[in-house]
Amino acid sequence: MMSKKMKLIPELRFSEFVIQEEWEYLNGNEVFEPISNKNHNSDLPILAITQDQGAIPRDMINYHVSVSVKSVENYKIVEVGDFIISLRSFQGGIEYSRFLGLCSPAYIILRKKIDVINDFYRHYFKSFQFIQDLNKNLEGIRDGKMVSYKQFSDILIPNPKKPEQQKIASCISSIDELITAHSEKLETLKDHKKCLMQNLFPQKGRKVPNYRFPGFEKDGEWVETGILDIASMKARIGWQNLRKEEHLDKGDYFLVTGTDFKNNMVDWEHAKFVGYERYIQDENIILKEGDILITKDGSIGKVAYVENMNAKKATLNNGIFRIRVANQYSKFIFYTFLSQRFTIFLQKLSGGSSIVHLYQKDFEKYDLIIPPSKKEQQRIASCLSSLDEIITAQSEKIEQLQQHKKGLMQGLFPNTSEIR
């Protein structure tokens, strides 16, 4: 283990600190001490420990675990700025609390014992470098045992001068704020799409939508039709199922699985491959531009539209229906499977319980409702497709910011792996 006298320099450093001394590293117990204060007011909120929001009052999230009054008496006080070692989220770093409240005595509460910037450690305890050190140096992580304060004490953590701590914390926090703002914009766009679809598609018991684009107001009622009246439905037959070793990392023939659905499209970048013999085994599941894919196993009812294939050659893995539309506008039919009508259909099949398989004999009973005019179908699909492009661009922007943050944190915090 690295000596306390060992000092490191981060790969990236703000200009005003370049000529300053190297970073000092201290043992965890020199910077933070454990807190076990149980002398509290029972009216304080009970905190849930989460990976995405840290410690947060249970009534602010969907949390339904009940706690007896007697149990709460043994709960520990958590103050704003405290850190919490959680067994469930420990692989993801140490959590931070922005709230005054109570938490289970099973958690370890850490409070700073020297003058440091809390936000600096809030980011550091989520960094790749710190989590890497946890995996290498702490006993009990892999066998599921609770992490002790003694184990935390043995970890060496950085303690640069306070101005540099503040600069780093402010930099990363500003990126977090930007990610949050873009994430909120993404959710607003998704809500707008949901509202739009509720108005563009007829609601339960109706045959006309709440809103029709100009020029289609007098086109009459939408028409109910069975799925097999407008499309063919195919899937990989049971005896054709692929073995795990047949899923290849490289190749010329894509293998699309339900996990390759991203934003209702096929994520070609992360899809696996399959050999030629398996690709040509069944021409019914060789994909074409405009095919609609719907999962029938596991998370049933996930939908993806096949486009941007260019010269790609692809087949389906088991667990997916391929819907190929014959005499309607396929992009519109794709959107009908994202509508409330299809969701209600799946809910009725389940009878209120979760189902893990969608049988073709049941799926064939599904009746779509479509406008009689292909031009109206195309107008609706074009509107929703344009909105999807904006949503996809927004999602990609968030991913880029997250990758930028990850790279920045790796540069701002020294990598200790070479000397451990």
Image: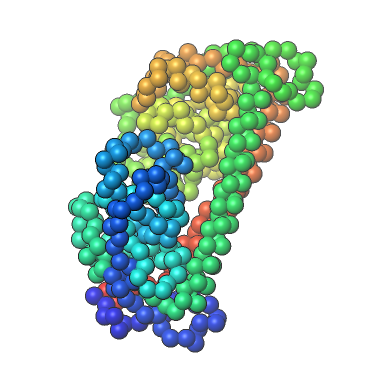
The x and y percentages for residue 137 are 24, 66
Residue at x 26%, y 50% (from the top left corner): 106
| In the foreground, 284 or 97 | 97
Judged from this view, the residue extending furthest toward the right is: 215
| In the foreground, 183 or 246 | 183
Q: Is residue 23 above or below residue 93?
A: below
Residue at x 37%, y 35% (from the top left corner): 64
Is residue 2 visible in the rendered image? The answer is: yes
Answer left or right for 308 relative to 74.
right
Q: Is residue 132 above or below residue 270?
A: below
The x and y percentages for residue 274 are 38, 42
The x and y percentages for residue 410 are 43, 68
Residue at x 28%, y 70% (from the top left corner): 29
Answer left or right for 202 relative to 49.
right
Q: Quadrant of the N terminus?
A: bottom left
Answer left or right for 16 relative to 3.
right
Q: Quadrant of residue 358?
A: top left
Q: Quadrant of the C terminus?
A: bottom left
Is residue 236 visible in the rendered image? The answer is: no
The x and y percentages for residue 130 are 35, 65
Scheme of image coloration:
rainbow
